[in-house]
Image (cartoon, rainbow, N blue to C red):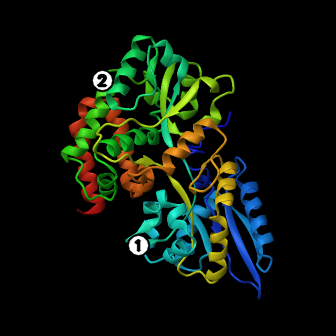
Amino acid sequence: MISLRLRRLAYASVAAALVAGTLCATAADAATLSVNVSARGNQRSTWQDAFDKFKKANPDVDLKVTYVSEEAYKVQMGGWLATDPPDVVSWHDGERMAYYAQRGLLEDLSSDWSKNGWSQQYASVKDASTYKGKQYAAPLGYDAYGFFYRKDLFEKAGIKGEPKTWDEFLDACKKLKASGVAPIAVAARDSWTLAAWFDYLDLRINGNAFHQQLMAGEIPYTDARVKKVYTAWKTLIDDHYFIDNALSYDLDSIAPFLVNGKASMMLMGTFFSASIPPSVKPQTGFFRFPVIDANVPMAEDGPVNVLLIPAKAKNKADARRLLAFMEQPQINADLAKGWGTLPSNSQAAEPDDEISKVGFQTLSNTKGGIAQFYDRDMQKEMADEGMKAMQQFYSDPSQLDAVLVRLEATRKRIYKK
């Protein structure tokens, strides 16, 4: 069983393993590559395998790889881009990418998307890789979010099939509670797990276009549409469909609830499947967050890790060669498999794991857009305050109006709108 305390191996194996690449020519045919990895998992060996394949396919490029520690990379990223950057860096899609694109620090990759067929192969994540109509990112792996559930507990409670609609979901919760099982486990001590709930309720009630406007600070938190999201959430809390004392548990300590059958469902990324022991896996399923409003196109959370070329890069020609290589379907699939994520290339082979297969199909065929997750779509300070407010709301849902008023004051201060 892997440790889940480091937030999401899931929500970002690569996010935790941010890559910085330097393809600066140090001699006529030489280039250097600096890569950031964390100590856990197969991140370094997975990267190295891809680089070895690139060097074999491109023998004229002398690729020299230096691995950089994760924390050092985070500190240096902004300085690199503004002064003397590597030629390839890895980062996150959504607001995190747009932050640097807005400041003119990233190379426009729109021609690469057109020339290399990325618009077709990476159609589901194109919007997340776009800023003001131009593409600045080359996607790597991502994670699908949905409900892990115990099939045997569903059957025992008399639930016939996976809930497809909100009414069916509420009915399943009611039956599970009556059978003596907590319907939903949530690790509310880790505020990002609550953010997943907000994301999905907003995406299903208001749609991705509204969600992205809210993430960009363009919509007041006192807007009736935002309150509608929290009100739907409040119904679940008021009906005691979540485990007791959820704010006491982080993801490490919550995992046994589902494994031991004390709770039946958990909204989480597909990475969580790695923590389910073989003895329980046959009884564990995974389904998409149900439809709430049939008129709202189905959007999903699918945080994407990407490669970027800094605007001040010195060797953009070789940088583009590396990106083109890494974006191939097979390489994209190999990277995702090594990191425990899903390939974002629609032509990549499907994962072997049954749960990952469901997530892959969901994200590959999503028509309503793919969000990057609450704290990647939003400016960091606002995201931090928003997730803190979610914990306050979860602790005392009767304070909903006061929580929204405080969030609105915070939005005005941060975005000055």
Q: Secondary structure at mark 2?
A: helix
**Residue 406 horizontal/vertical position (percent):** 25, 46
Give the distance between the C-alpha atoms of the residues marked 1 and 2, in whole angstroms.
Answer: 42 Å
Q: Residues within 10 Å of mark 2 (few under 14, many from 20)?
A: few
In which quarter of the view is residue 118 placed?
Answer: bottom right
Compared across the picture, whether 60 is left or right of 392 comes to: right
Residue drawn where x is 29% and y is 30% of the image: 234
Residue drawn where x is 63% and y is 71% of the image: 324
Residue drawn where x is 33% and y is 31% of the image: 166
Point out the tag, 1 or 2, that comes first from the N-terminus: 1
Identify residue type, mark 1.
Gln
Q: Are marks 1 and 2 in contact (CB under 8 Å)?
A: no
**Residue 106 horizontal/vertical position (percent):** 50, 75
Identify residue type, mark 2.
Asp
Q: Residues within 10 Å of mark 1 (few under 14, many from 20)?
A: few
Identify residue for label 2. 238
**Residue 76 horizontal/vertical position (percent):** 58, 68
Disc ID at residue 191: none
Q: Secondary structure at mark 1?
A: helix
Compared across the picture, whether 229 is left or right of 88 comes to: left
Identify residue for label 1. 102
Compared across the picture, whether 191 is left or right of 393 comes to: right
